[in-house]
């Protein structure tokens, strides 16, 4: 499944060649290849942290501060900055690099923008491969930064070792977060721009909400990414080596999700194009005689029978 | 699923970003994936980001009149980084007299202020490198 | 549906700013409240006799290369008939970087002269009588206070009493944040230094304008005429409030303030805009700040520039016509000074011929057009009065919006103003791309691209760039370092003890001790808890941290 030129590319990535790393990720992005299954048991591994939150919360600045901290510990870091592609034009504005300038020229920091490219399921295909590429390159830490609080953030939670939600005082973010479901999966919440009035109160109210919904599992930290306040406190809460040790679990989840999404998409397309009618159940559902649950039940029944 | 990847940066100390922002937005609307690097970037920094992004195009916005020296430095940095098949384009305040010299230096497309976006998009789409293969040889 | 040729109709029935207008206006536009020129609220002009008392200043921006290169161009312009000087500076100077800063290489002497030490200012003004000529120093970043300090010192050295100095320093740090100078215009230090300049000038130089609030550059982003006024007034308000907080009266503060406005394409809208500006400003000063109606504070003094963003590189000679119409708007509106862009503005700095043509444009306007002999010649025109009233109302609405958001300073801090500018900018590009707004030579009446620029192109000189870097490096290596260090330490200590200390005198002492612009500003930045270097690369070579302890 891996042909000769790619084998050569992989070898160069393992040797730490940056240009090969960049090219390998492009090959994955272009959809030409997926390696995760073939390399599922590779021993190269990193701790993966997902960073998400609404625009304006300071995610990029906080990600950059975490990179700085990681570098002070001698860790090699890869950052994947995920941005949405426009559904209308297919284009994208990638990775807020303006704020990561401080790491320019550091040979042990690799930053890459990834656009969702209208793939259904967001980036569930490319991300695991890109993370793997970084691990082969020798990254000890991989940060995956995503925009917004939504399904994409939830999806990514399954393929990283910990999820950090970054929020700040500005118009009811705690409510937005709760509605969007990402609070279900966050391991740590950082209330950023802690110097702004209301930050302490916000942290407090989020803590209460989390205690209600998730017991004591989730920590809330106040940070000021611009000057580094709170980063040292945040670090051990997000850098979860013990979880990363079981990277086969992470890769297994990712691979599973990839299959699920692909199968789901294929079936959904056939139904939408009216090529698969489930013995008339689809038509019946549209006509109001059959419920959606019954249609789904039909599919499940037929597929489990093999 | 292939998209054209572009890195846009400003040359030198000039800080007027209107043009660069407009081009960034327009290229995105044309379906490209654009990384905008902003101000005060050295040629080496620009090329380093383009290498990491495996960009197909580097776009320079030059408004300070020093486009010739800057282009030379970027082309040199691209050579050092092995980015010879990456398309280099430059726009901004450029006298038409300087266009042949810029081409000689290694700039592909030159778009003085007032160039309509279709021309820039069309040029990039026609001149960008083809499919990326397994890796640089 | 499109009629062409003989039957062609106007494609766009909106003003330049996008306001719909009727096919004609008539007596229903109430003119009865219009007071004569020279009386409050000054809609019709500041002077009863219009330009009969004094024509507008013909002030062309000039500057490039070394201080002596610019000096030569100044003298050329004065010979050609310019009646005032207007000096821009190079990017490193604006960004408060000395020529030997790693990022400065390639930009030294580019956009204007490179000025970094006191002797540069002497060279810049060599052979020019500072007591006679009117000088405008285009500097709004933290560099401004140093340049002003230099200018005052050089005048005194030459025996010119400060009260004879005539001119302006732009001194509008907040607008400069939107012109790419955010790095050298931190908000609090910027406003503080602006007030220091205002105090220094108002105290010693009655004929000097302490600020030239730059609405022009805001307009260049593509905002509307009403926004230009509202945002400009908002920024002026910040400086006025800051100066009043230090205990100065409104006359002292606003009496020496002036404005720099755009002269844009829609001729009649621009005239109306500037009339509305005088009307609104005088009301703001009298009703809001209790200024006397006939005081200097109530008078909106206007320096104006033809809109550079309307100049295009295609068919460049067409720009002469654009510039002429725009300058005409300025004269019809009664502005105090005009800078005409070079027709080659979109191609580079003006060639000598372009510069000369700019002066000629103004001379033809002044001597041949007949416009200057009557004050407010368009006064009473139904359309112009309608637009004046409408723009004044719109301006006030926007100002109310800004107030509701917590005031202009807040709008700068939280990025609202930046968003307004960005939206307008993108909108304008889209209008031109779609053809909705016709620009001859760009999306209409286009031709093949020229292969050469009429009358030649001004070339950036790498030789000057390199020579300057060498000179300043040598200068720093051979001066009395201890003496420089002491003077800078004094500056730092004074600021650390009290941020409201007026630093002009201390800066002058540092300049006399061979401190450079980058070093002086860097020292002040650190006293304000900022990084020494605006670009974040260099530290303080004198290591003055802790000097106050």
Image (tube, coloured by chain):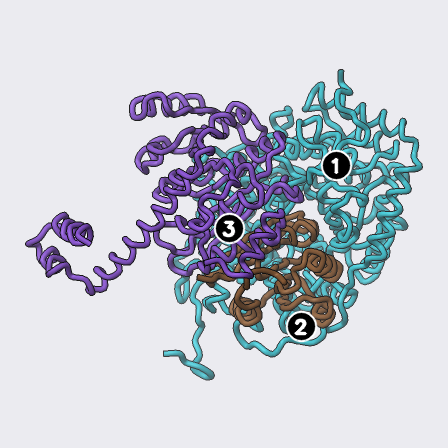
- In the image, C224 versus C164, the foreground residue is C224
Question: Are both tags, 1 and 3, on one chain?
Answer: no
Marks 1, 2: nearer the viewer: 1
Rendering colour (chain B): brown
Judged from this view, the residue extending furthest toward the top is C549
Residue C41 at what x, y percent from top left?
A: 54, 44
- In the image, C72 versus C37, the foreground residue is C72
Q: How far apart are marks 1 and 3 (CA)?
A: 30 Å
Residue A143 is labelled as none
**Chain letter for the purple colouring in the rendering:** A
C541 displayed left or right of A240: right
Residue behind mark 2:
C317
**Chain letter for the cyan colouring in the rendering:** C
C325 displayed left or right of C158: left
Which residue appears at 60% of the width and 25% of the height?
C245
Residue behind mark 3:
A94
Residue B87 at what x, y percent from top left?
A: 61, 64
Residue behind mark 1:
C538
Q: How far apart are marks 1 and 2 (CA)?
A: 45 Å
Judging from the image, mark 1 belongs to the subunit labelled C
Residue C14 at what x, y percent from top left?
A: 44, 63
Q: Is mark 1 on a helix, strand or loop?
A: loop
Upstream in sequence: badge 1 or badge 2: 2
Question: Are both tags, 2 and 3, on one chain?
Answer: no
Q: In this view, does C508 lie above or below A146?
A: above
Marks 2, 3: nearer the viewer: 3
């Amino acid at each position: 499944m891996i042909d000769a030129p790619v084998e050569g590319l992989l070898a160069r990535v393992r040797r730490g060649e940056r240009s090969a790393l960049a090219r390998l990720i492009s090959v994955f992005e272009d959809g030409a290849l997926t390696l995760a299954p073939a390399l599922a048991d590779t021993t190269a591994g990193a701790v993966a942290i997902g960073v998400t939150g609404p625009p304006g919360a300071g995610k990029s600045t906080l990600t950059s501060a975490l990179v700085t901290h990681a570098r002070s510990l001698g860790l090699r870091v890869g950052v994947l900055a995920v941005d949405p592609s426009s559904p209308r034009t297919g284009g994208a504005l990638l990775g807020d690099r303006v704020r990561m300038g401080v790491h320019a020229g550091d040979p042990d920091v690799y930053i890459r923008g990834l656009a969702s490219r209208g793939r259904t399921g967001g980036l569930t295909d490319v991300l695991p491969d890109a993370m793997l590429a970084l691990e082969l390159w020798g990254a000890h830490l991989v940060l995956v930064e995503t925009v917004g609080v939504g399904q994409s953030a939830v999806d990514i939670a399954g393929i990283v070792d910990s999820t950090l939600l970054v929020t700040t005082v500005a118009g009811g973010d705690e409510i937005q977060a709760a509605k969007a479901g990402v609070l279900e999966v966050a391991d740590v919440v950082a209330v950023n721009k802690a110097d702004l009035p209301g930050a302490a109160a916000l942290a407090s109210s989020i803590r209460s909400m989390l205690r209600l919904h998730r017991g004591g599992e989730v920590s809330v930290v106040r940070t000021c990414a611009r000057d580094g306040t709170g980063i040292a406190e945040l670090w051990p809460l997000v850098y979860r080596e013990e979880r990363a040790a079981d990277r086969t679990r992470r890769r297994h989840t990712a691979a599973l999700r990839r299959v699920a999404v692909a199968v789901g998409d294929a079936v959904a397309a056939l139904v939408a194009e009216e090529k698969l009618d489930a013995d008339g159940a689809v038509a019946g559902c549209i006509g109001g005689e059959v419920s959606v649950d019954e249609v789904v039940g039909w599919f499940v029944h037929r597929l489990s029978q093999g | 699923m292939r998209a054209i990847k572009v890195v846009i940066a400003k040359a030198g100390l000039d800080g007027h970003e209107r043009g660069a922002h407009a081009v960034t937005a327009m290229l995105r609307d044309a379906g490209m994936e654009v990384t905008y690097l902003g101000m005060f970037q050295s040629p080496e920094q620009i090329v380093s980001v383009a290498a990491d992004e495996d960009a197909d195009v580097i776009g320079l916005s030059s408004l300070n009149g020093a486009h010739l020296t800057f282009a030379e430095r970027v082309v040199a940095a691209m050579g050092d980084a092995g980015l010879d098949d990456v398309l280099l384009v430059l726009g901004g305040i450029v006298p038409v007299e300087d266009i042949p010299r810029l081409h000689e230096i290694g700039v592909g497309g030159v778009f003085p202020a007032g160039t309509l976006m279709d021309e820039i998009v069309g040029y990039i789409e026609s001149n960008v490198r083809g499919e990326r293969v397994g890796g640089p040889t | 549906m499109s009629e062409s040729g003989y039957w062609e109709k106007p494609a766009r029935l909106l003003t330049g700013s996008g306001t719909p207008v009727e096919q004609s206006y008539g007596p229903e536009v109430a003119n009865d409240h219009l007071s004569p020129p020279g009386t409050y609220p000054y809609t019709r002009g500041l002077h009863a006799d219009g330009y009969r008392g004094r024509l507008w200043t013909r002030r062309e921006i000039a500057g490039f290369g070394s201080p002596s290169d610019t000096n030569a161009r100044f003298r050329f312009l004065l010979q050609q008939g310019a009646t005032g000087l207007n000096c821009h500076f190079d990017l490193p100077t604006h960004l408060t970087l000395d020529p030997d800063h790693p990022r400065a290489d390639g930009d030294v002497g580019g956009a204007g002269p490179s000025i970094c030490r006191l002797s540069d200012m002497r060279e810049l003004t060599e052979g020019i009588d500072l007591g006679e000529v009117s000088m405008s120093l285009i500097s709004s970043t933290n560099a401004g206070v140093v340049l002003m300090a230099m200018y005052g010192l050089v005048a005194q050295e030459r025996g010119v009493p400060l009260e004879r100095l005539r001119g302006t320093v732009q001194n509008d740090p907040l607008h400069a944040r939107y012109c790419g100078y955010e790095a050298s215009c931190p908000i609090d230090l910027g406003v503080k230094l602006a007030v220091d300049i205002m105090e220094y000038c108002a105290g010693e130089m009655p004929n000097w304008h302490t600020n030239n609030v730059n609405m022009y550059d805001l307009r260049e982003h593509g905002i509307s005429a009403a926004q230009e006024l509202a945002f400009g007034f908002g920024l002026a308000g910040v400086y006025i409030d800051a100066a009043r907080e230090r205990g100065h009266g409104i006359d002292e503060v606003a009496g020496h303030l002036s404005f720099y406005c755009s002269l844009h394409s829609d001729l009649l809208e621009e005239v109306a805009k500037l009339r509305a500006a005088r009307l609104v400003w005088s009301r703001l000063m009298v009703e809001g700040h209790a200024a006397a109606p006939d005081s200097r504070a109530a008078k909106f003094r206007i320096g104006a520039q033809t809109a550079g963003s309307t100049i295009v590189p295609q068919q460049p000679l067409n720009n002469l016509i654009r510039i002429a119409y725009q300058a005409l708007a300025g004269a019809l509106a009664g502005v105090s000074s005009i800078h005409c862009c070079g027709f080659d503005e979109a191609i580079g700095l003006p060639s000598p011929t372009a510069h000369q043509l700019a002066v000629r444009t103004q001379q033809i306007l002044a001597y041949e057009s007949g416009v200057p002999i009557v004050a407010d010649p368009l006064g009473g025109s139904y359309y112009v009065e309608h637009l004046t009233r409408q723009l004044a109302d719109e301006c006030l609405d926007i100002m109310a919006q800004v107030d509701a958001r917590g005031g202009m300073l807040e709008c700068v801090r939280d990025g609202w103003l930046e968003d307004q500018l960005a939206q307008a900018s993108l909108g304008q590009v889209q209008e031109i791309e779609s053809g909705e707004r016709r620009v001859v030579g760009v999306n209409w009446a286009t031709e093949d691209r020229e292969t050469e620029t009429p009358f030649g192109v001004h070339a950036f000189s790498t030789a000057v760039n390199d020579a300057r870097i060498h000179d300043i490096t040598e200068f720093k290596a051979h001066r009395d370092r201890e003496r420089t260090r002491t003077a800078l330490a004094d500056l730092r200590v004074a600021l650390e003890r009290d941020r409201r200390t007026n630093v002009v005198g201390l800066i002058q002492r540092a300049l006399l001790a061979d401190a450079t612009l980058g070093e002086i500003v860097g020292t002040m930045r650190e006293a304000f808890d900022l990084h020494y270097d605006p670009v974040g690369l260099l530290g303080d070579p004198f290591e003055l941290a802790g000097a106050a302890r």
